[in-house]
Amino acid sequence: MSWMYRPAFALLAVFFVGLVQAQTSTTVRVGDIRLDRTSPSFQSYADGRQFTIVSFAPSGTASGPVTPVALSLDAPGDSNSGCEPEHFSSFPAGHIALIQRGGCPFSTKVLNAEAAGASAVILFDQGTQANLPLPAFTLGEGFTGTIPVLALTFEWGQFFANTSGLAVDIETNLFSGPQTVALLRYCEGNPEHCALSVRHVNAGWERHFNPERLHSTASTYKTLMLLAYAEAVVAKQLDPNFTVDKEEWARFSMRSDGGALVAAWDRLGNPDQVSIEQMMSVMMRESDNAAPDWLLNELGEAAVAEVVDQYIDGHHDVPISINAFFQFFQGMTTEPGPAARIIGKYDSLLDEGWRDELNALFQGQMQDDTWMQDQRNFICTALPWDSVPPGCSFGGQNSFEDRRTILGRYFSRTNSRTMLELMTALLQRDLLDPDVQAVVEPLMEWPLEVEGISDRFSRFGAKGGSFGPQNVCNMTAYLEDAASGDQVAVALFIHESVHSCGAGLFPSAFVQAFAEDADFRELVRNEPMFDRVFSDRFQMP
């Protein structure tokens, strides 16, 4: 897709490989990050939109004029801005250095600037390619500088360089350290965006941070769809080996899945037909959005609601059609910009009118193959085995902020305590009928098929999910360490972060470390710093 987001996270096998390394470090935002222009006029820029952080840069503040350093705007391929101490021979002490990428490591540029008396550095991309997203610059884990550093695209760097009399205020609040600890520090610094529940089953303790706060489930709701599938199999309403045509499998797909449908079809060997069990496999493994809608259509919403009533101890909205939801998110041929209307008309997913409208779309126009094809044409996408038609219009007219609002308020929601209870029950095999558990478990524990996982864990059931513009990054899991037999359960929900799931915040690294690293578990349980994160710690009944 050409859009700058990944609406639904594809929890691929590669997500699990090699993430738990005790010494692997990252950088996360743990407080306000500001870049404000103070001259020639005031303008506040947005973190993650007009600028971004630089990994392993220190926290700090700076204020003053911006001075370009040996820039090469007309010949960006020749840039070595800031690589030589003589580039700063006339640099005014206390100014903020504007430095272009190219010629040497970023750490060299920043250390040269600090030695020349710069109070901060703004790095920007080289400019050899146009219209690139915000860069992911790093100074390296061993960086020793002390001044704050931020990053811009080439286009914004060029604008700053050409703005006469430019002065800015900068503030950065960052933590650089092990990925697992960084996630906790992020929650500590951004409590309004984070919910976390952990349980060490063997030792009988658990800790919670914002455990009742409702967050968008993103693709974690597919665990409930898996339970509905298993119930239907045991009741002989569905035959796992029954095959359907690939077009039937993907009949509701809008391809808003981060590439999951393509990855799933490729893993299965590009078949013309797939079994129902294979569809459930890709729903959990690649996080395909076509399979759960096929299942919802086959079983009906009442069957899914029964699963919520029977198995959920806490709050979980009854799942909706994810592809119907994305019609409103992306816009439709019949209504290019529906988001503003939805936000103005309905309070949230809990509004019966909103659910009725979603269901009417799913049970109405989306059942028409011609309408669905027109809709795919409208958003310039196609099923993996089809070509994108010429002349498509690249989707609707919903604003970025309206899309963020819809993702946060109008999709199925749950909380971390509810999902912790569900993960624990699946781990301990005391929730489901044994026949239902036998259907669920192999599909839930697919990570064990990944090389390097089964020799570390004897049980590993997980479902994650994400929504791009809202920057939702969720992980629900249960694990049993193969060596020690320790059992844990974790439910993590993050929203409105400018970090993506694989850039700064690594939920799988946290989950795996909690399962197999006793020292990290004790840090979570006892470290006073984390007492400010976790709201309660008590013995399980």
Image: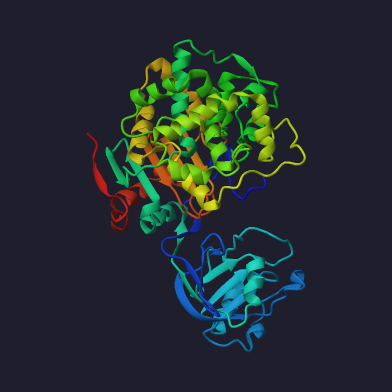
Percent position (x, y) of residue 72? 73, 75
Q: Relative to 369, say whether 74 is above or below.
A: below
Residue 141 horizontal/vertical position (percent): 53, 63
Quarter of the image where the N terminus is located: top right
Nearest to the observer: residue 63 or residue 491: 63
Q: Could you say which is closer to the camera, residue 442 or residue 311?
A: 311
Relative to residue 97, is residue 472 drawn left or right? left
The reply to whether residue 320 is in sight is: no
Q: How is the image coloured?
A: rainbow
Residue closest to the eye, 383 or 350: 350
The reply to whether residue 119 is visible in this rendering is yes
- Residue plotted at (57% across, 32% down): 288
Which corner quadrant of the image does residue 152 belong to?
bottom right
> Which residue is more in the foreground, 123 or 143?
123
Query: Residue 314: x percent and y percent?
Result: 31, 33
Residue at 43 percent across and 17 percent down: it is: 231
Give the quarter of the image for residue 105.
bottom right
Quarter of the image containing the C terminus? top left
Q: Position of residue 533 (x, y in %)?
A: 32, 53
